[in-house]
Amino acid sequence: MGKRQSARRWRMASWGEIEQAEPEFISAVRTCFGVRKHCTMATLRRDGSPRISGTEIQLEDGELRIGSMPRAVKALDLQRDPRIALHSPTVDPPEDDPANWDGEAKVAGRAMEEDSKGESHRFRIEITEVVWTRVRNGLEITSWHPDRGLQTRRR
């Protein structure tokens, strides 16, 4: 490996593995991603700067997947550098009862292309981190990481 390449290997998991280990947590994350059809995705452009795009997710057979139109710039970004972040659709917490808000969720990982048949691209997300943020007597941030498991912080 070159000097600039990291020797560190990231541990990753599938949606199903996290669901098996932390069913209540991943159910809350699923609820956040289900409030609307489109979520926000971040990829890296050729020059390393971020690109934000809308996308839809699919949860099937214990896997988190995304798709895109053929030769879409977000797909080209992922073919070049598979690092990805997804942010659930957001809704504002109710002003009169913020604790009644389901929260918002984020997923980070690597997008592995499964197939590209000319009419579309399909990627499976290998997950490196999941974060769920909500309001409970202040801000509550629950995160899952393959090396640390589930952790909750309050602010």
Image (cartoon, helix red, strand yellow):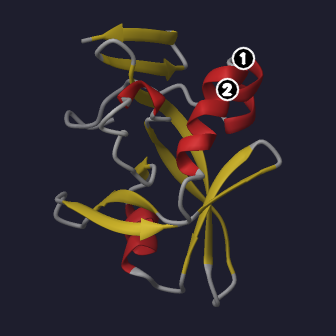
Kind of residue sitting beneath label 1:
Ala
Q: Position of residue 8 (x, y in %)?
A: 39, 24
Q: CA distance from mark 2 to mark 1?
A: 5 Å
Q: Secondary structure at mark 1?
A: helix
Question: Residue tagged by mark 1?
Answer: 21
Image height check: is 28 above or below 90?
above
Question: Residue tagged by mark 2?
Answer: 18
Q: Position of residue 66 (x, y in %)?
A: 59, 62
Q: Residues within 10 Å of mark 1 (few under 14, many from 20)?
A: few
Residue 117 visible in the shown view: yes
Q: Position of residue 117 (x, y in %)?
A: 69, 84
At a point 41% along the width and 74% down the height, the residue shown is: 76
**Relative depth, front residue between 115 and 91:** 91
- Image quadrant in which you'd find residue 132: top left
**Could you tell whether 129 is left or right of 137 in the image?**
right
At a point 78% along the width and 42% down the height, the residue shown is: 62
Image height check: is 83 above or below 1?
below
Q: Position of residue 113 (x, y in %)?
A: 60, 62
Q: Are marks 2 and 1 in contact (CB under 8 Å)?
A: yes
Kind of residue sitting beneath label 2:
Ile
Most distant residue in the right direction: 61
